[in-house]
Image (cartoon, rainbow, N blue to C red):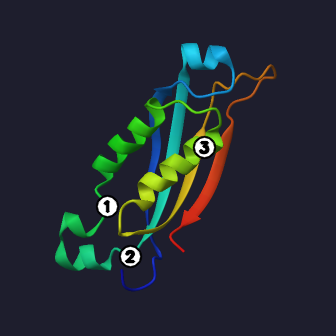
Amino acid sequence: MSGVAGDRIRLAGVRGRGFHGVFEHERREGQEFVVDVELGLDTRGAATSDDLSATVHYGELAERLHASLTTDPVDLIETLAQRIADVCLGREQVASVQVTVHKPHAPIAATFSDVALTINRSRS
């Protein structure tokens, strides 16, 4: 990849029913998880060539993110966020990624609208 990865592709609001969590009822009943990703990459090659293979196919990425949310339960959203970052960084064009995992139905007694974790990862 040449140049600076200052360009961004953002995919927000990918939803899926997952069975992640430390409590038995979370693993048994599941709940909705939502993920947002922002990819850092250099899109000049794709812009010049007008070739989809020179960039990230966000439709395919959305499917992979959904699969990450809905399979292989883990205890922590930190683990889930890292899994998603690894999926994004699996594309050679992606130099960095910001991942936010939302758990809007977390088992918290207080009234709240969302619990979210944001991580930043890069190749270097």
Residue identifier under label 3: 79
Residue identifier under label 2: 42
In which quarter of the view is residue 7 placed?
Answer: bottom left
**Residue at 18% of width from left, 71% of height from top?**
50
> How many residues crowd mark 3 within 10 Å: few (<14), some (14–19), many (20+)?
few
| 94 sits to left or right of 34 | left
**Distance (Cα) linking label 2 and label 3:** 27 Å
**Distance (Cα) linking label 3 and label 1:** 24 Å
On residue 93, which mark appears?
none
| 63 sits to left or right of 40 | left
Which quadrant is the N terminus positioned in? bottom left
**Residue at 50% of width from left, 70% of height from top?**
123
**Residue at 64% of width from left, 27% of height from top?**
21
Is residue 10 visible in the rendered image? The answer is no
Q: Secondary structure at mark 2?
A: loop
In the image, residue 52 above or below residue 3? above
In which quarter of the view is residue 10 placed?
Answer: bottom left
Q: Nearer the viewer, residue 30 or 15?
A: 30
Q: Give amino acid for label 1.
A: Val
Q: Give amino acid for label 3.
A: Thr
| Residue extending farthest bottom | 3
Residue identifier under label 1: 56
User: Mark 3 vs mark 1: which is more N-terminal?
Assistant: 1
Q: Nearer the viewer, residue 97 or 113?
A: 97
In the image, residue 41 above or below residue 102? below
Q: Secondary structure at mark 3?
A: helix
